[in-house]
Each structure stands twice: as structure tokens, then as C-alpha cells.
Image: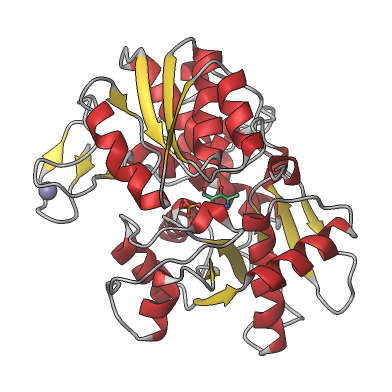
């Protein structure tokens, strides 16, 4: 069952919808709590957590053995972070976790044609999974998206539509296409974030069935952050962890609506002007699940931070010097984590995870 957080309406999860009749997004209500005894330990992929997912391994037509990405310490003693290498997923970003669940669910419902809008990575991921599942895919991106992400989308056989202007313009343009084919939007579809929960499940298992002290993530529309929140809240309800990790949402200084709202103590965001940043994955002025993001930050005892392009470039260079090649949107998380450590918000004697959400191979211009 899906539930509308705005009007309370329930919608069957067999229905081919992407939002509530009232215009709000929907959330998945059927999530079952995962317990340690239910982990399928000989399944070396994110499907080992199928007990906590809306679908199981046997439903996964598009299957890559994806997940179980490395969790590695950095090489700088003064910065004792743990890096989660989401860059090694099949299409090179964490978005594959959401696509794995969303695309396989759509295949099960008989969907054969999808359309999506994306800053690049989610589109590349959807195109990759659609190719594997044998469904037809169309992706809308901003004109400014990195050429390497566009090449990836086209290589998988998806039709690419480039829209001038900022990311929000692309989101508006796709609405017309969404009347012709199924709108498999990673931002609207409730099942996408259900798949991203496996990021949280993996961190829990990799840390010896414990929650990290903190998780630092780049946040645009918030799927990585909400995925971690929902995973750990479920584990907490199941008695598997005794507290939530503190979640830190990181945004580009040029476009930071969540940061501004959180720092102001607001439970919704005020309209902000978004300037350009090399962190193209998080350039969103009005995230759909903004209230849920702000609530997750508050409930977890976390916070927000920003970094500018200069800090992002320096962070990317310092990660590469440690053997970790990531795109600017991912380096943003490290840039901000360093600032949070310097200010004493993150403690050096605790396990703090920095999620490296996308590969450096995507930043080619
Ligand atoms: C590399 C990378 N990191 C983080 C994000 C942010 O994800 P979300 O918009 O779900 O917060 C994106 C989104 O495109 C991305 O491409
Ligand atoms: Zn509604």
C-alpha cells in the first residue's frame, strides 16, 4: 500500500501511479522490518536484505549482483572517516540501489515504456536497468549535465531529451512526456527510496550490526538520506539497533534550501535562488520530500553543512590522492565532513561514514 502524507489517502501499490490524486508524493507503507536472522548471507548482493524490501531476489529480472560496496577508512590520520564507495555500483552511482527495486517492480507490473528526469546519474542508472530488463526508456536531463553521463544514457539505448535551464526546468518539462509513458521518476516513485534503504542495511552489517555515529551525505532530493533514515528507523523499531545514526545533509553553497531551512529551525523550506555549482547532482531548489528530509535530520540528531566549488575541488583532489576517484557531487560530502570535524560537530573517536555517491569517471567534460 502507498500512503499520501498530505491527505492520508491510501493507494494500492499495484496501481500505476506516481503521485496522489491531491498532487502530493506517496510513500510506501508496506515495509517490513529487517532482522539480522533474515539476512540471506550467501546472496552476495543487496538482495540479501530482501526480507526488508518490497521485492525479493526471485523477482529481480534485472540483476547485477549489485551492492555490498566497500566501506574503507581514509588514509589521513587526522580525518578518521569511513568511506562508503557507492561509485562501484553497476552504473557508477548509489542510484542503482533504487533502480534495482523500482525497475524490477515495474517489470512485474507489466510496464514496458518509462520516462524519467534526472541530473544525470539516476537517468544513467534507469537506462542501465531498463536495458537489462528489456524495457524502453526515455530520459530528460538539463543541458548542462556532464557529457559522460549523457553518453552512458545513450549507450544503454535510452532516448535522451536535453532541456535548457536549471534542473527544476527539466522536472517541469518531463511532466508532458509522463502522460504518454510511465513516469518512473526516482524522485516521485515511493519504491526508489525503498531500494536505497539497502545503503543503510549494508552500513549496519559492515559495522558489526551497529549504527555508525554519523552519516554524511550529499542531498538534493534526499533519496540517499531518506534511504538511510528509513533503514535505521526500521532496524530501531525491530530492536536491532538502539539509536539512529546522526544524519548530516550536505549541499552546495550555491544551492542550499535544506541547509537554510534546517539552520532556521523551519519544518519546510523557503524559496531560494539556486546558483550554479560543480556539484550538479544536488542542484535542486525545492525537493519533493523536503519536510521528511528536515524531520529525519531533526529526529536523528544530525545537521547540515555546505561547501563551495573551491572546497569541493580540493576535497576531490584529496580523495583521489587516497585512491578514491569520485565526481564533484560526491566530493562535496567529504568537503563538508572535514568542516564538521573541524568545528567539533563530528568527533574523531566515533565511526562517521562519508558516502561517496558517484564515480569520478562521470565528470568528463
Ligand atoms: C552523485 C550524486 N550524489 C548525490 C545525489 C543526491 O541524491 P538525492 O537527489 O536523492 O538527494 C545525486 C543526485 O543526482 C548524485 O548524482
Ligand atoms: Zn493526497
In the drawing, does residue 91 fall left or right of residue 239? right
Q: Residue at x 58, y 18 (%)?
A: 156
Which image quarter: residue 173?
top left
Above or below, 216 relative to 72: below
x and y percentages locating residue 22 in the rendered image: 9, 47
Give residue 169's position: percent from left, percent from top. Answer: 34, 48
Q: How is the image coloured?
A: secondary structure
Q: Is residue 112 left or right of residue 322?
A: left
The quadrant holding residue 67 is top right
Please, which residue is most extreme toward the bottom here? 343
Residue at 23%, 31% (x, y): give it: 176
Q: Is residue 61 visible?
A: no
> Could you tell me if residue 69 is visible in this image?
yes
Quarter of the picture holding the C terminus: top right
Q: Name the residue nearer the viewer: 309 or 218.
A: 309
Residue visible at 64% across and 73% down? 336
Q: Is residue 288 left or right of residue 12?
A: right
Q: Quadrant of residue 328?
A: bottom right
Query: Which of the two residues, 236 or 167, is positioned nearer the viewer here?
Result: 167
Q: Identify the residue at image location x=36%, y=26%.
A: 115
Quadrant containing the N terminus is: top left
Amino acid at each position: 500500500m502507498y500512503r499520501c502524507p498530505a491527505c492520508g489517502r491510501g493507494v494500492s501499490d499495484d496501481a500505476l501511479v506516481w503521485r496522489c490524486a491531491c498532487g502530493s508524493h506517496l510513500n510506501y507503507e508496506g515495509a517490513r522490518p529487517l532482522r539480522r536472522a533474515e539476512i540471506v548471507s550467501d546472496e552476495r548482493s543487496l538482495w540479501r536484505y530482501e526480507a526488508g524490501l518490497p521485492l525479493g531476489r526471485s523477482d529481480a529480472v534485472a540483476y547485477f549482483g549489485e551492492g555490498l560496496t566497500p566501506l574503507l577508512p581514509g588514509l589521513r590520520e587526522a580525518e578518521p572517516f569511513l568511506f562508503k564507495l557507492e561509485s562501484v555500483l553497476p552504473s557508477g552511482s548509489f542510484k542503482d540501489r533504487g533502480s534495482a527495486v523500482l525497475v524490477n517492480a515495474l517489470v512485474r507490473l507489466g510496464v514496458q515504456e518509462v520516462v524519467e528526469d534526472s541530473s544525470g546519474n539516476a537517468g544513467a542508472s534507469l537506462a542501465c536497468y531498463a536495458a537489462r530488463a528489456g524495457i524502453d526508456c526515455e530520459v530528460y536531463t538539463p543541458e548542462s549535465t556532464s557529457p559522460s553521463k549523457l553518453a552512458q544514457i545513450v549507450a544503454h539505448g535510452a532516448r535522451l531529451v536535453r532541456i535548457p535551464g536549471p534542473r527544476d526546468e527539466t522536472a517541469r518539462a518531463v511532466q508532458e512526456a509522463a502522460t504518454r509513458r510511465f513516469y518512473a521518476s526516482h524522485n516521485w516513485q515511493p519504491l526508489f527510496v525503498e531500494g536505497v534503504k539497502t545503503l543503510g542495511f549494508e552500513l549496519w552489517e559492515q559495522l558489526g550490526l551497529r549504527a555508525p555515529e554519523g552519516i554524511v551525505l550529499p542531498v538534493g532530493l534526499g533519496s540517499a538520506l531518506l534511504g538511510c533514515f528509513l533503514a535505521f528507523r526500521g532496524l530501531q523499531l525491530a530492536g536491532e539497533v538502539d539509536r539512529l545514526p546522526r544524519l548530516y545533509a550536505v549541499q552546495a553553497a550555491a544551492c542550499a534550501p535544506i541547509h537554510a531551512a534546517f539552520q532556521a529551525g523551519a519544518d519546510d523550506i523557503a524559496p531560494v535562488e539556486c546558483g550554479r555549482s560543480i556539484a550538479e547532482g544536488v542542484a535542486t531548489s525545492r525537493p519533493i520530500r523536503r519536510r521528511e528530509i528536515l524531520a529525519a535530520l531533526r529526529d536523528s540528531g544530525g545537521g547540515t553543512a555546505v561547501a563551495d566549488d573551491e572546497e569541493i575541488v580540493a576535497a576531490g583532489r584529496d580523495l583521489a590522492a587516497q585512491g578514491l576517484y569520485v565526481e564533484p557531487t560526491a566530493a562535496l560530502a567529504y568537503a563538508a565532513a572535514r568542516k564538521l570535524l573541524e568545528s567539533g560537530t563530528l568527533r574523531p573517536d566515533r565511526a562517521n561514514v562519508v558516502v561517496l555517491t558517484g564515480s569520478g569517471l562521470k565528470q568528463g567534460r
